[in-house]
Amino acid sequence: MSIRLATWNINSVRLRIGLVAKLVEEHSPDVLCLQETKCADDSFPMGDVRKLGYSHVAIHGQKGYHGVATFSRLPFVTTARERWADKDDARHLATTFAAGPLEGVTLHNFYVPAGGDEPDPAINPKFAHKLQFLDELTSWSTRIADTGGRIMVGDLNIAPHPDDVWSHKQLLKVVSHTPVETEGMEAMRQAGRWVDAVRAHVPYPEKLYSWWSYRAADWTLADRGRRLDHIWASADVAARTTGVAVLREARGWQRPSDHVPVIVTID
DNA sequence: ATGTCTCGACGTTCGAGA
């Protein structure tokens, strides 16, 4: 039996619950991780999620900003909501599958800080926060590097490789692709012995994006995208992945999120 | 590439965050 696992920055789950339903109808993920849900836990559209067939739901939200949620058809037993970078701002959720093909596997759903506009931690506290978050992810990855059964997904808000952005040269000073971020992300990946499950199936140098700005008049025209949304796994789990899909077409749906779903299939 | 979304709030428009 194979499992489909999806991650998607939905940019308001209440506004786009219809698009979540469309994703489920068309791609039927067994596990769905959302970021930027933007609502408090008591406002979450839980009834809609259950109607979509997810009887196992974990949410970690707050009013207005950030927020993550994990839906599953497979039971999970433990839920952790860790505190990162000295803030309680609803950016992480961990669940461990209790039965089925992924039994014992822990899934971490992250929404890493965007980091503001100015890539200088001395003058931009949001960028300093992002770098601190990245440092903590690296320390955490080091601590769990020797364990198997790990998946981490989410909007990591960094496009790590020159072929993960439309123009490496033009984005070197743009937050999401600066050297301190891309090198930090690679250090984190190595510290945790994480495998980039998406690039395992769509190798470099093929261009691959998961986000296109709302600000472009026509996102398809210049195709100025970035790959900010990721699925990483420990080597044992990565070896079981058989394919990935980045749903570029979802950027053209009615009132879309600026991010598109990324899906991995695990045997 | 200063453009477009979403949210909450002493709201009918604005500032903040992305």
Image: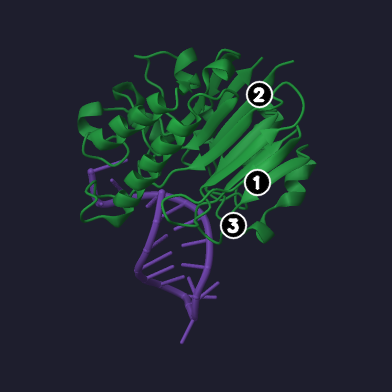
Q: Residue at x 58, y 44 (%)?
A: A93
Q: Earlier in the sequence, mark 3 or mark 2?
A: 2
Which residue is denoted by mark 1 in the rendering? A17
State the image coordinates of residue B13 (x, y, percent, origin top left).
Answer: 40, 72
Residue at disc 1, secondary structure: helix
Report the mark closest to the observer, 1 or 3: 3
Residue A91 placement, left or right of A71: left
Which chain is green in the rendering? A
Count of labels in the image: 3
Q: CA distance from mark 3 to mark 2?
A: 26 Å
State the image coordinates of residue A145 (x, y, percent, origin top left).
Answer: 48, 26
Q: Amino acid at mark 3?
A: Cys
Which one is nearer the viewer's eye here, A252 or A19? Answer: A19
Which chain is purple in the rendering? B
Which residue is denoted by mark 2 in the rendering? A4
Which one is nearer the viewer's eye here, A150 or A267? Answer: A150
Which residue is denoted by mark 3 in the rendering? A39
